[in-house]
Amino acid sequence: MEAVPRGGAEVTTIARVAQEAGVGVGTVSRVINGSSAVSEATRRRVLEVIAELGYEPNATARALSTGQTNAVGVIAPFFTEPSVTERLRGVSPRLAGAGYQLILFDLERPEQRDQAFRSPIGRVDGLLSISLSPTPDELERLAAAAVPLVLVDQSHDRLPTVTIDDVEGGRLATEHLLELGHERIGFAGDQEDGAYGFTSSSRRRTGYEQALAAAGHRPEPELERLGGHGRAAGAETARRLLDRPEPPTAIFATSDLTALGVLEAAEELGVRVPEDLSVVGFDDIEVARYAGLTTIAQPLRESGAAGVELLLEALAGGPAPSRRLPLELVVRGTTAHARTGRSFAVSKASARIAAAHTSRVT
Amino acid sequence: MEAVPRGGAEVTTIARVAQEAGVGVGTVSRVINGSSAVSEATRRRVLEVIAELGYEPNATARALSTGQTNAVGVIAPFFTEPSVTERLRGVSPRLAGAGYQLILFDLERPEQRDQAFRSPIGRVDGLLSISLSPTPDELERLAAAAVPLVLVDQSHDRLPTVTIDDVEGGRLATEHLLELGHERIGFAGDQEDGAYGFTSSSRRRTGYEQALAAAGHRPEPELERLGGHGRAAGAETARRLLDRPEPPTAIFATSDLTALGVLEAAEELGVRVPEDLSVVGFDDIEVARYAGLTTIAQPLRESGAAGVELLLEALAGGPAPSRRLPLELVVRGTTAHARTGRSFAVSKASARIAAAHTSRVT
DNA sequence: ATGAAAGCGCTAACAT
DNA sequence: ATGTTAGCGCTTTCAT
């Protein structure tokens, strides 16, 4: 394995091209940018030299000069999470289609939060933030730098946003369980995360409580548990719920990952799903379908695409009206009638084929 | 919803800070970069002004000046595919941990191929390419620009790479099927993709053919089908295989996505899996577990992490020895003995819980 | 139509 | 220890 020689940065510059073509750098710049008037003869010659030398304009220098980077930053706390990746799947192609580079600002640790909205300045033309909201101070700085910002999965009164109605989502999930005759419905949510300020879980909880109240149930604090995010945490939360003298017959988890953890815990404790326990998740990430999980589906990929759309509009100087995306209850195999344990889904097929037997209820 | 004022780029520059602090720009630069000798008094004063003005150094300007961007480019054809996303999950945190920005070069259309290795020059300090190999010419340019490049999922004789043994993978899959007593084993692969030059599928096919030959089977071209990549394409390929007078009793698909398509087609045609048809995939993407798919697992996330590791070493000027990652047969519910149709897996549980009943065979 | 030169914000070499 | 200045590679006036 012969190593590739690492020559010093002997990249062709615009000056080199100009010299070789016997013209000024200004002229070269003009042909590159398809600018106004350059005689057909010189244009051709310059183009020739460019091809010959394999010249590629230095994006950094151009950015410094024009003040435009042609890059968009995407702030993504926990890029490793399926729901975030799924949103990004909507972001990336659209951005590329619009000729923008995508710079990912992945935050996996709380310390990184502080830099989130600061470090991108000067590096990007616009910002898309997933689930994270800027402080007033950060917002002001962004405005001063004329960097438009769009929020996905977070509402804001001064920024274009792409959101869903979390409260309604919580209500939908709970009503589904209520309709199935469940009386003791547990709640497995995320605890308020100070560093990031994610709030969707608590709004979903509000919906859950509203639905319960509307059905005449009084609040039972011992049925509401908050834990960390993710699968393992969900399992832990579920254990605390299931390990009670009078365990719930159904659990609403505020994310699919958490719900998957609940299923894991149930399996572990010998609690049958959906016979003994019904489970509803939230998000409808890809695996939910294969896990046969009943869930509140939100258009993840579309949210990313819509965010880009808004950002592009803002970048073009136009208005960027916030958008609210629809929610949908997707019934699969993890929910059933309280007494009978008979699955609500059309057919109680194995989870692998359950995907084909999904009833969607809006 | 009050719009945020978009002021003209009134960002604080280093000059402004210098002026405000009554020092030269050089001094400010020194304190920013923690450079050598600056009197404690001035350092403090400068720091104060910086905080007060909320000054943030312009990364672009710095990059132009130093020739370092502190960014790494990741070339990812089909970022939207699960396997690619999974690799990226290994990349992102490590890169962030090392203080590098991640710039994603997503290629979804063939035309973008040409720019892949060119446009990043000058924008990044190093490059990580997933499944895509540079042409000799591109490689030369990269070398001239002193931009190190690491390949993931693609071998190369002059570049550091992170690979798996695709041939062995194909062999492993086929041997598993052979051991289960299958005689008519179909192959569902990707057709050579001219634009991208992905070659793993055909290497896996080589392994498949080797295993067959070693078992004394003679090649049956009509059992080998090439189709597009992805789920729908996999279903189509499977239909062509299953729609024959003497259909195979097992199919090796060169990717999990393809395998999922095969399952879909089987379901559609009323072919029971694994009773009538055994299916083996490749990759072990997240959903494979939930779909209960038997597959050849490759360490996707680790491959991304290893790639970053190598790139970091190259960036530090050190040697970056290529790495080969291990493969593993993961038996789940889609493979069974040829005659009996009895599942090979420990327990033939529903796919949802199949995850817990997985036998790993190396 | 095109060359020359200023300037984008920063770093680093050079003075002092 | 710290101010001054010359680039980094490009775009964009301003001349001509």
Image (cartoon, coloured by chain):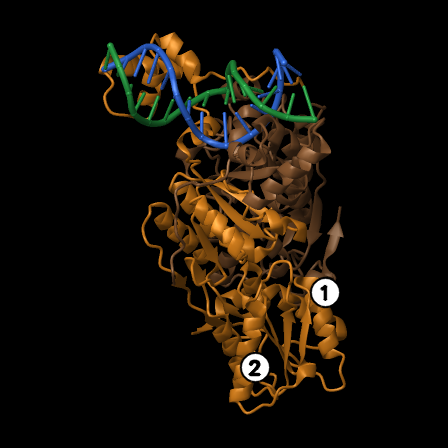
Chain colours: A orange, B brown, C blue, D green
Front position in the image: B263 or A276: A276
Image height check: is A145 above or below B260?
above
Specify the amino acid type for callout 2: Glu
Question: Which residue is denoted by mark 1 in the rendering?
Answer: B347
Q: Is residue A9 left or right of residue A27?
A: right
Whether callout 2 and callout 1 share a subunit is answered: no
Residue closer to the observer: B6 or B245: B6
Name the quarter where the N terminus of chain B is drawn: bottom left
Secondary structure under the numbered disc 1 in the rendered image: loop
Q: Residue at x 55, y 77 (%)?
A: A206
Q: Which mark is residue A209?
A: 2
User: Chain ID for label 2?
Assistant: A
Indicate which disc residue A192 carries.
none
Q: Secondary structure at mark 2?
A: helix
Near mark 1 (Cα within 10 A), the count class, few <14, some 14-19 or many ≥20, is some
Residue in the image at 72% along x and 58% along y: B358
Q: Position of residue B304 (x, y in %)?
A: 64, 40
Residue at 50% across, 63% down? B270
Q: Nearer the viewer, residue B65 or A340?
A: B65
Rendered view: B247 above or below A7: below
